[in-house]
Image (cartoon, rainbow, N blue to C red):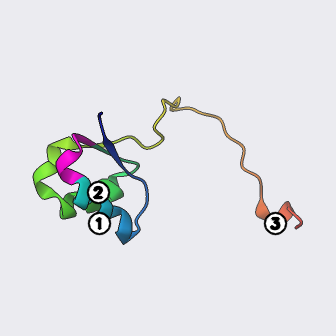
Amino acid sequence: MRVIGVAHAMRPMFYDWLSYYEPIIPQFIAVSHVIADKLQQFIPHRQPDIVVRPYAVEVKPALDRRYSDQANHSN
C-alpha cells in the first residue's frame, strides 16, 4: 500500500501526525508554499519529498471566477 501525506492546514496536530508517520510516507503534498515550508521545519531531511500542489487538480491560470459578496447574503 502506498501512503501519501497531505499537509492541508496550519494546525499543529497535522504536522505532528505527518512527522509521526513520516517513516512510511514516500511523498508529501502541501497545499501552499507556506505549509510546505512549515512541514520542512518538522522533517527537514525529507525536503526533497515535499511537493506543493495548491489545488490538487489542474486549474487554468486565467480561470474566470465570480465570487459572491457576503454582504448580499441573508441568513
Determine which quarter of the picture holds residue 38: bottom left
Q: How far from the left and from the top, in percent, is residue 30?
A: 35, 49
Crowdedness near tag 3: few (<14), some (14–19) or many (≥20) residues, C-alpha within 10 Å = few
Q: Disc 2 marks which residue?
A: 18
What residue is at 88 percent from the left and 67 percent from the top? 75
Closest to the observer: 37 or 50?
50
Say above or below: 30 vs 61. Answer: below
Counting residues from the N terminus, which is met first, the one under dot 1 or under dot 3?
Answer: 1
Say above or below: 7 vs 3. Answer: below
Measure the C-alpha gap from mark 1 to mark 3.
38 Å
**Left or right placement of residue 12 versus residue 49 in this view:** right
Closest to the observer: 60 or 56?
56
- Callout 2, which amino acid? Leu
Q: Secondary structure under badge 1?
A: helix
Question: Residues in magenta?
Answer: 22-27
Q: Disc 1 marks which residue?
A: 16
Counting residues from the N terminus, which is met first, the one under dot 3 or under dot 2?
Answer: 2
Q: Secondary structure under badge 2?
A: helix
- Callout 3, which amino acid? Ala
What residue is at 67 percent from the left and 40 percent from the top? 65
**Left or right placement of residue 65 versus residue 9 in this view:** right
Q: Disc number at residue 71?
A: 3
What residue is at 39 percent from the left and 40 percent from the top? 53
